[in-house]
């Protein structure tokens, strides 16, 4: 899992976190993000359209790696894998979810926001974790501090991240990529303004390239 997820997140420094409110938007939205340079997508199970959207994107779209987010229980984990999710992201963990997630056939990226939660996941053998909710849990400063005692753990932080603070996160050596919902504003999706979403994705890629230069 570790090398697969590291490879995946290095390819995609920004992972859009998406809630699908209308199933018909799934394909054009995923295409718009892919075409803007963001091919790794987290579709959350926050709406009933999440699972069918994952299935549709997986079956119909080339050049996109689609995973499930907001997986909070064993049923969600099972359904997400059956729908074809290529990775699983959770906001936090429970002992059962952690143990099942570690045995899943696709990379499992649980959320943590404290040293103890990190240690529970590390004990289970995980080396790449989501840091959530990033901004309200101390942001880039906390991640930098985790780097002291836990130098072999990498992160994908999400929660309150946007272009205004992405540089702070990418400056932390353990951050492989960041996630966020700012790439898919509700009004743009509702109006089917796919060119605007492609532009947001492109803007994010350009910003990352400038930061990493
Ligand atoms: C998540 O689940 O990762 C977050 O809800 C994304 O956070 P954001 O909406 O603040 O970007």
Image (spheres, rainbow, N blue to C red):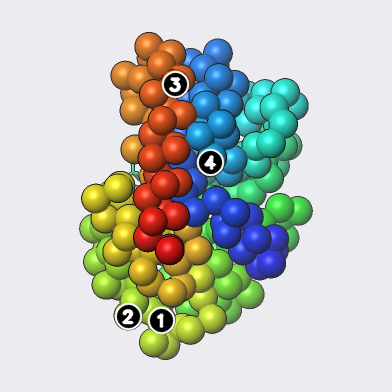
Residue at mark 4 to residue at mark 1: CA–CA distance: 27 Å
Q: Which residue is drawn at 36% across and 69% down?
A: 171
Q: Name the residue under label 1.
A: 147
User: Which quarter of the picture shows residue 24?
Assistant: top right
User: Which quarter of the picture shows residue 37?
Assistant: top right
Q: Establish if 143 lies above or below 197.
A: below
Residue at mark 3 to residue at mark 1: CA–CA distance: 39 Å
Q: In terms of secondary structure, where does tag 1 sit?
A: loop
Q: Which residue is drawn at 38% across and 11% down?
A: 191
- First-in-chain label (3 vs 1): 1
Q: Name the residue under label 4.
A: 38
Q: Which of marks 2 and 3 is in front?
A: 3
Residue 47 appears anywhere in the view = no
Q: In terms of secondary structure, where does tag 2 sit?
A: helix
Q: Which residue is drawn at 61% across and 63% down?
A: 6
Q: Nearer the viewer, residue 48 or 23?
A: 23
- First-in-chain label (4 vs 1): 4
Q: Report the side of 32 relative to 58 (left or right).
A: left
- First-in-chain label (4 vs 2): 4
Marks 1 & 2, CB-CB < 8 Å contact = yes
Q: Report the side of 166 relative to 199 (left or right).
A: left
Q: Position of residue 41 (x, y in %)?
A: 55, 40
Q: Mark 3 points at which residue?
A: 195
Q: Mark 2 points at which residue?
A: 145
Image quarter where the N terminus lies is bottom right
Q: Which of marks 3 and 1 is in front?
A: 3
10 Å neighbourhood of mark 2: few (<14), some, or many (≥20)? some
Residue 172 appears anywhere in the view = yes
Q: In terms of secondary structure, where does tag 3 sit?
A: helix
């Amino acid at each position: 899992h570790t090398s697969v997820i590291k490879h995946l997140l290095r390819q995609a420094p920004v992972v859009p976190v998406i809630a699908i409110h209308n199933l018909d938007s799934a394909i054009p939205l995923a295409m718009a993000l892919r075409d803007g340079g963001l091919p790794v997508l987290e579709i959350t199970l926050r709406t009933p359209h999440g699972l069918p959207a994952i299935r549709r994107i997986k079956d119909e779209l080339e050049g996109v790696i689609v995973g499930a987010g907001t997986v909070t229980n064993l049923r969600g984990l099972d359904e997400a894998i059956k729908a074809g999710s290529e990775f699983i992201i959770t906001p936090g963990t429970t002992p059962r979810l952690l143990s099942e997630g570690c045995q899943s056939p696709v990379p499992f990226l649980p959320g943590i926001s404290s040293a103890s939660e990190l240690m529970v996941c590390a004990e289970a053998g995980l080396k790449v974790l989501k840091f959530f909710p990033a901004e309200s849990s101390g942001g880039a400063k906390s991640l930098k501090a985790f780097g002291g005692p836990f130098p072999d753990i990498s992160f994908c932080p999400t929660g309150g991240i946007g272009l205004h603070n992405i540089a702070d996160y990418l400056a932390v050596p353990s951050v492989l990529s960041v996630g966020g919902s700012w790439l898919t504003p509700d009004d743009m999706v509702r109006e089917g303004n796919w060119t605007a979403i492609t532009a947001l994705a492109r803007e994010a890629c350009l910003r990352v390239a400038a930061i990493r230069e």
